[in-house]
Image (cartoon, rainbow, N blue to C red):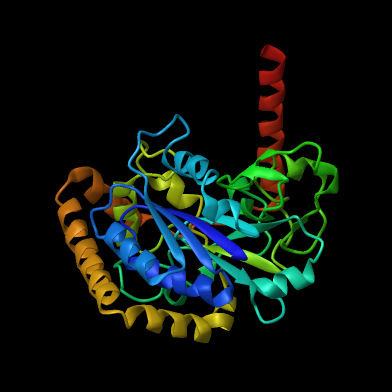
Amino acid sequence: MTHLAILCVRNEAAFLLEWLAHHRAIGFDHFLVFSNDCKDGTDQMLDRLQDLGGLTHIRNAGPYDKGGIQFTALKAAAKLPVVQQADWILPLDVDEFVNIHCGDHSLAALHNALPDATAITLTWRLFGNADQVRYEDRPVTEIFTRAAPSVMHWPWRAAMFKTLYRNDGTYAKPGVHRPRDPDLTRLDAAHWFDSHGRPLGAQFKTRRIFSNFGRDNYGLAQINHYPLGAMETYVLKADRGRAVHSEDMLGLDYWVERNFNTDSDTTITATAEERNAALAELKADPRLAKLHAQAVKWRRARFDALMQREPFRALFGRLLMTPPSRPVTENAARFMIRHANLARQSDAENS
């Protein structure tokens, strides 16, 4: 096994096959997937995928530690042979797609570009809703092609990254955004690079979870992040709850900080042919095809049920009324950052 992707899912069966097909097409050869309290057949789909090979499915039924569902799963993952045997590891979410720009757009091409890397930070590029109201059973990467500018000054969440890291003992555990529990005796020999190909400083080796914003971070690769989807999909996401803070219902704050649609980005289509071939192979399995169709039907029925409840109907109405988000200017971002730094200074003085 060379590349392992780790995924946590709940009620994501309608999106799972596209996600798997894309990441198989670019070079991931095994997947460790934790499912949690699924109502749409996601867990049954994962059982079938495990039977077919190349995927390990674990039901993450709880109880969960104070870090939440995703942290509990990743903590458990560190002890598994499938994790310990991997050469490279990348924890992802089902709305995140690795998009490599160099060479033949594969993981091998990225490693060829950064042969000395211990870790590569793959920065999010946020893809907005693009006024898509109803859920469609089509590839997410084809429907949503409007994105944030390549240079963002605010919010800092727009520059968050996921870390593809070499499983050589430098870090003992996978984490949501970066590997955890470093071996301090190995850190000096670790080499971190960003997804533009730039070497990163020591602070990235132990604590940073977002790239420096105000510059292009996507020269070699990026993560296409589709956190919103169609408005209908977002209502179901609010029903599902957050992956980290599952008790918090998603609202307009989350939506506004991610709904950027100023630029067109179709670079992920570079591997569409390979993705389509992998997807066709998965859907050729009658069991998977049936489970996918059932999941699509479940999503539509669940949305209809949620629309009978005021909190979700109100949320859907607000989404219809909310325009796309405006990127913040550099001067406005500096104003916000200055006050954020003043707040941190005040907190430090009063602690």
Does residue 349 lie above or below 133 as drawn? Answer: above
Image side of residue 44 versus residue 129, left or right = left
Image side of residue 95 versus residue 194, left or right = left
- Seen at 69% across and 73% down, the residue is 108
In the figure, residue 12 lies in which quadrant?
bottom left
Residue in front for this viewpoint, 126 or 32: 32
- Seen at 67% across and 75% down, the residue is 101
- Where's residue 121, x and y in %? 68, 56
- Where's residue 26, x and y in %? 58, 75
Residue in front for this viewpoint, 9 or 305: 9
Residue in front for this viewpoint, 343 or 271: 271
Most extreme residue toward the top is: 350
- Looking at the image, how many numbered discs can be counted on the residues? 0
Does residue 58 lie above or below 284 as drawn? Answer: above
Image side of residue 99 versus residue 32, left or right = right
- Where's residue 310, x and y in %? 19, 44
